[in-house]
Amino acid sequence: MKTRTTTSPAHQHQVFLISGGTSGVGQALATGVAALGAKVVIISRTTESGQQGVAHIAQVTGNDRAEFLVADLSLQASIRSAAEEFKRRFDSLHVLANVAGALFFDKQLTAEGIDQSLAVNYLSHFYLTNQLLDVLQASGPARVLTVGGAPRFLRQPVVDLQDLQLAHNYSGMRATSQAMFARLYFAFALARRLHGTRVTSVAFHPGLISSRLVQGAPWWLKLLTSVLKPWEKTTCESGVYVATAPAAAGNGVFFDEQKRLVALNDQYDPAIGEKLWQLSEALTGLASR
């Protein structure tokens, strides 16, 4: 169904960069923001998927200004290359939305020796943001968005700082949940670092969005998620809200799928967040800069 583009003077000159913008939450967010007339740049794994992604945005919204960058978000070298290309092609960045994710049910290492789930579902968010913080700060006011889960599952975060890559007792679901908690620790730690600047860090729950996440999942998970199909959406109102609404410009805040503020920050120990940040810097090479 085609969505009419409603050009907003507040957004038509802004640049939005969205990871995972070719499916799921990323695609829903990209089309929602593009419908406001904004400049949307999506990160895709291949040129083909990127071309299909921008074509979808144009078809659904009528906004033909979307562009794409190619990056393998499991590889830091690829993320770094994409960030450098972004800076060559664009002068500003007003919203960076880290929403890419994938499910890995078996232990896999990337070509750089990092656990695949940790690399895609957490470190890509951390590394891409740090690569683009300079242009975000120069473009302020700007926002960094971090995707989270349902608040009821986020109130007791568990991150094993001694075994962040789950070398022992690995399970796909445990790796996924640990990465989700790590993203929230990152979002709140980033907010503390951004205090007093013109860039804010905002986390949100997108709700139940149609995606391809469980394509390679075990049969039992496919069966379980199939029950939820009738409630899945192709739009992401909460994501568009936190990306664009003046009322969502707070720093270190979390919004649920109904666009309501949820008090989660206090349940994420700053000391753990700082330790995780240090470990993440070591894993991405940022600590040696």
Image (cartoon, rainbow, N blue to C red):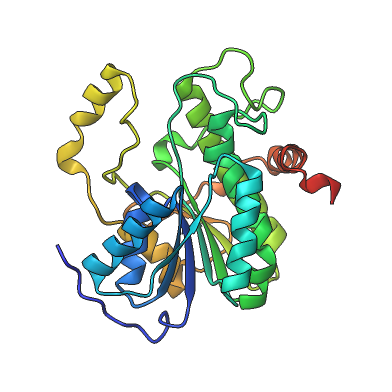
Quadrant of the rendered image containing residue 197: bottom right
Residue sitting nearer the eye, 12 or 205: 12
Residue sitting nearer the eye, 248 or 71: 71
Q: How many marks?
A: 0
- Visible residue check, residue 267: no
- Residue 60, x across and y down, in percent: 22, 65
Q: Residue furthest right?
A: 288
- Residue 210, x across and y down, in percent: 26, 44
Q: Is residue 120 above or below residue 42?
A: above
Q: Residue furthest bottom?
A: 9
- Residue 227, x across and y down, in percent: 18, 30
Say which residue appears at 22% left-offset and 67% top-offset: 59
- Residue 12, x across and y down, in percent: 40, 82
Q: Residue furthest front?
A: 48
- The quarter in which the N terminus is drawn is bottom left
Residue sitting nearer the eye, 284 or 80: 80
Q: Is residue 277 above or below residue 138?
A: above
Q: Is residue 271 above or below residue 156?
A: below
- Visible residue check, residue 153: yes
Q: Residue furthest top?
A: 169
Q: Left or right of 233: which side holds 217?
A: right
Say which residue appears at 77% left-offset and 43% top-offset: 285
Quadrant of the rendered image containing residue 4: bottom left
Quadrant of the rendered image containing residue 108: top right
Say which residue appears at 43% left-offset and 31% top-offset: 103
